Image: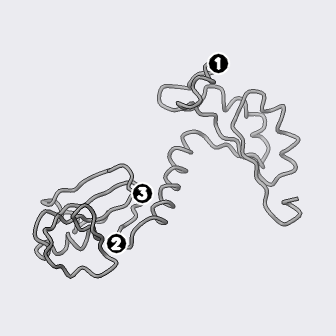
């Protein structure tokens, strides 16, 4: 029905034992077929052990044998393989970038890795000339564009630093202390 309406149809499944018996008839009826390398996680570890499955190696979370189970189907040009390492490195990064772009405040800079960078000024209530929309008060501090503080440190007395963190008030990546703000204003994030 989706194809008759002009949609491109894709099916995505994990690579499981016996996959090569189930999938070939379906592949011809879709535009693309994606097979994700089966991954080991905290939430499925018990079930994986129950099926006598194990990790491919001690560096990745791919399940041993997952690529072999898909090998025959991967010969079809419509079928694509999405490895565990690709999902970790590329898809996660792209997801972070999209989230950062959607959630960033006007003064936050989105990095190439999908983190957000902004400045924090620990101020004591003195007036400032930071343009509306380019700052927010948080926990008694002013959060603003990192470059405003780095390029004009004398205009904003008190402690200043630059924060890099994951979107949605996520994990803190780095705090650049005040004595390094000069270095940041001269480099590209």
Residue 184: percent from the left, percent from the top?
22, 64
Q: Which residue is mark 2?
A: 107
Q: Which residue is mark 1?
A: 50
Ranked by sequence position, the earlier of labels 2 and 3 is 2
The secondary element bearing badge 1 is classed as helix
Q: Specify the quadrant of the image occupied by residue 24.
A: top right
Q: Nearer the viewer, residue 23 or 148?
A: 148
Q: Which mark is residue 120?
A: none
Q: Nearer the viewer, residue 126 or 39?
A: 126
The secondary element bearing badge 3 is classed as loop
The CA distance from mark 3 to mark 1 is 37 Å
Ranked by sequence position, the earlier of labels 3 and 1 is 1
Q: Specify the quadrant of the image occupied by residue 4.
A: bottom right
Mark 1: few, some, or many residues within 10 Å (few <14, many ≥20)? few
Question: Is 69 left or right of 164, judged from the image as shown?
Answer: right
The secondary element bearing badge 2 is classed as loop
Quarter the N terminus occupies: bottom right
Q: Residue at x 59, y 33 (%)?
A: 39
Residue 43: percent from the left, percent from the top?
56, 31
The CA distance from mark 1 to mark 2 is 50 Å
Question: Is 58 left or right of 6, judged from the image as shown?
Answer: left
Q: Which mark is residue 167?
A: 3
């Amino acid at each position: 029905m989706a194809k008759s309406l002009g949609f491109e149809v894709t099916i995505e499944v994990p690579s499981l034992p016996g996959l090569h018996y189930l999938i070939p008839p379906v592949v011809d009826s879709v535009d693309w077929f994606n097979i994700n390398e089966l991954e080991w996680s905290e939430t499925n570890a018990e079930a994986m052990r129950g099926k006598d499955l194990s990790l491919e190696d001690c560096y990745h979370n791919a399940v041993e044998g997952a690529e072999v189970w898909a090998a025959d189907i991967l010969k079809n040009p419509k079928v694509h393989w999405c490895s565990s390492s690709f999902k970790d490195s590329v898809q996660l990064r792209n997801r972070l970038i999209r989230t950062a772009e959607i959630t960033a405040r006007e003064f936050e800079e989105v990095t190439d890795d999908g983190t957000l960078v902004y400045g924090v000024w620990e101020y004591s209530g003195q007036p400032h000339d930071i343009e509306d929309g380019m700052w927010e008060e948080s926990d008694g501090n002013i959060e603003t564009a990192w470059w405003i503080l780095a390029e004009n440190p004398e205009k904003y007395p008190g402690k200043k630093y630059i924060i890099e963190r994951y979107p949605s008030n996520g994990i803190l990546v780095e705090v650049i202390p005040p004595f390094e703000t000069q270095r940041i204003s001269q480099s590209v994030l």
